[in-house]
Image: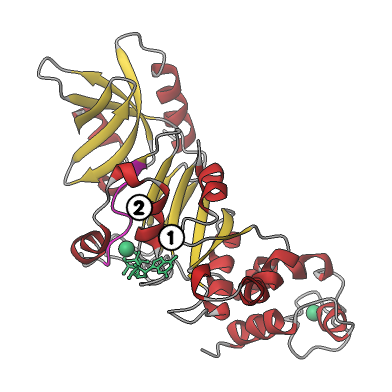
Amino acid sequence: MTKRSREGSSLVQAAHPDRLLGTVLRAQSGFFWVQTANGLVECRLRGKLKQERLATDIAVIGDCVEISLMDDGKGAVEAVLPRRSKLARRGAGSRGAHKEDVLVANLDQVLLTFACTAPTFAPRMLDRYLVICEHSELEAVVVATKIDLISPAAAQALFAPYERIGYKVFYVSNTTGEGLDAVRQQVAGRTSVVTGKSGVGKSSLLNALYPELQLATAAVSGALNKGRHTTTVAELIALPEGGFLADTPGIREIGLWQVPAEDLAWCYRELRPFLGECFYAGCTHIHEPDCAVRAALGQGALAPERYESYRRLQVGEE
Ligand SMILES: Nc1nc2c(ncn2[C@@H]2O[C@H](COP(=O)(O)OP(=O)(O)OP(=O)(O)O)[C@@H](O)[C@H]2O)c(=O)[nH]1
Ligand SMILES: [Mg+2]
Ligand SMILES: [Zn+2]
């Protein structure tokens, strides 16, 4: 049976009267914690489902599942509904080169978190994250933290090139609370992953946004992210206004960095209008004559830093 038709049959079963729909917040060792209208239910999988799907792919956090309740208040996952999007890691691993590891299902956006300072803002790292998001066709927004440590003009200067090419940038201080309301609105009702390198303030952001949720700031990254295979996303937090949020180690660190060379230019979104205008069909926009991208660069239509960042990735300079 094809994947599509199997998923199709799950949808039909979703209408089953004595079953509940819910979202998987946490998945660990065959147990699934599912948020339902009746609260959080600890579930195992039905045997039938286990046979149908490969072990790693059965259900992941963010999956919408159909469960049946048992007398002891626990549940059984009966079906996994089709995924509308996913954050996945392809390739590598013991399960074969083409196996896809889905880390979060039904993801709406990635919050790329960067500190304005401490640690120093690294634009090339932001570019890499953006490439990954563009390639996965995930909406990316930037959260610039620690604005209390620099002047507003200095913060704006760091991120203006990204705003200019259409990325949303939220300027926040987790310390003073400035800018948090806008982020709260951006995540309400959606499923989001907060990512960025250590120390930028991801956990502080979650705590500042939702003090009532009382997250264990440093403890989480210490205990959960040093797993057997550099851990993925630990768990989703159900937000008070609806929607879900996960704190994760850098998406680059978890091995998503595998964008084919021929797709790279497209992942720099401001280059898209020029792609297809070059003399050579397979133009890499590095050295070829009559290159529309380099012409645009020469005319000042592209930010030189972003082009340089593209060039370095394209030629494999670290
Ligand atoms: N001044 C200032 N300090 C902040 C801000 N946000 C976070 N910090 C501080 O920066 C440090 C790192 O914050 P965390 O929230 O632990 O950073 P993280 O991104 O979760 O780091 P990992 O869990 O290691 O990946 C802590 O000392 C925070 O108090 C901010 O907006 N302003
Ligand atoms: Mg943290
Ligand atoms: Zn070109």
**Magenta region, residue range:** 230-237
Q: Position of residue 277 (x, y in %)?
A: 87, 71
Instruction: Locate residue 130, reporting x and y percent.
Output: 58, 66
Q: Is residue 44 left or right of residue 1?
A: left
Asked if the magenta segment contains residue 116, the reply would be no
Please give the label number shown on residue 74.
Answer: none
Residue 102 appears in the picture as rendered: no
Residue plotted at (58% across, 57% down): 141
Q: Which residue is mark 1?
A: 174
Tell me the residue at 48%/69% (across/down). Answer: 146
Quarter of the picture for ligand 1?
A: bottom left
Q: Is residue 229 left or right of residue 92?
A: left
Mark 1 vs ligand 1: CB below 8 Å: yes
Q: Earlier in the sequence, mark 2 or mark 1?
A: 1
From this view, report whether residue 227 is shown above or below residue 18: below
Label 1 neighbour load within 10 Å: few <14, some 14-19, many 20+: many
